[in-house]
Image (tube, grey):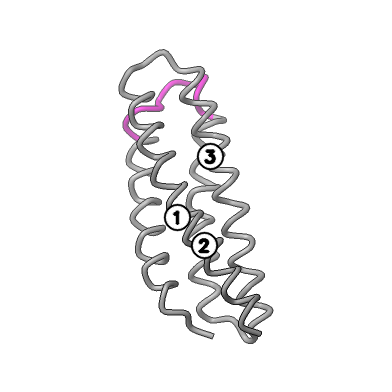
Amino acid sequence: MKNDKSGGIKIRSYRFSLKILEFTKECLKGREHWIISNQLVRSATSVGANVSEARGASSRRDFINYFQIALKSANETKYWLCLLRDTVACSNVIENSIKFLSEIEEISKMIAASIITLKRNK
């Protein structure tokens, strides 16, 4: 059940996870940001983890389910990034949040397009 687009999504979501990990480590050190930082890391890394799991799926249905979970994690990631953007009074955090929102939006579109294609081509 390997999809040509999933390799690109896998690499992109992995790089996104790395950037989020670096960002939270560098910029979100305060105790007040710990909860948001923790949730952001969990949801952002879940995107790539589920895309990777999909590549080892035992059926088309299983593959689609992993991609759907990845899409849900991407939506959750958007929530945490918006919360950071709107509550943290640090220009670096705001700028990075906006940049990350753009990237996760593109990843989300890739995942959603793959899900639609997979469902259509049963």
Residue ID at (62%, 86%): 58
Q: In the rendered structure, which amino acid carries the disc numbered 1?
A: Ile
Of the 4 image quadrants, the one containing the N terminus is bottom right
Residue shown at 68%/79% (left/top)? Answer: 61
Is 27 part of what is drawn in magenta? yes
Question: Mark on residue 78?
Answer: 3
Read off the magenta span.
25-34
Q: Position of residue 74 (x, y in %)?
A: 54, 50
Quick one: quadrant of the C terminus? bottom right
Quadrant in the rendering for residue 4: bottom left
Instruction: Residue 66: name its quadrant.
Output: bottom right
**Residue 107 marker:** 1
Q: Indicate the secondary structure of the residue bearing disc 2.
A: helix
Given contact means CB atoms under 8 Å apart, are the residues at marks 2 and 1 in contact? yes
Viewer-side label of 2, 3:
2
The percent position of residue 77, horizontal first and vertical second, equals 53, 43
Q: Secondary structure at mark 3?
A: helix
Tag 3: residue type?
Answer: Lys
Q: Nearer the viewer, residue 20 or 29?
A: 20
Q: Is residue 44 above or below residue 113?
A: above
- Residue 92 percent location from the top left of the image: 31, 23
Location of mark 2 (residue): 111
Identity of the residue drawn at 42% across and 65% down: 9
> Counting other residues with Cα less than 10 Å from the Cα at mark 1, is it few (<14), some (14-19), or many (20 or more)?
many
Which dot marks residue 87? Answer: none
In the rendering, at what x and y percent does residue 22 appear? Answer: 32, 41
Identify which residue, 68 or 41, lies in the foreground. 68
Residue 90 covered by magenta stretch? no
Q: Dominant secondary structure of the magenta stretch? A: helix
Q: CA distance from mark 1 to mark 3?
A: 11 Å
Marks 2/3: CA–CA distance: 14 Å
Rendered residue at 64%/77% (across/down): 120
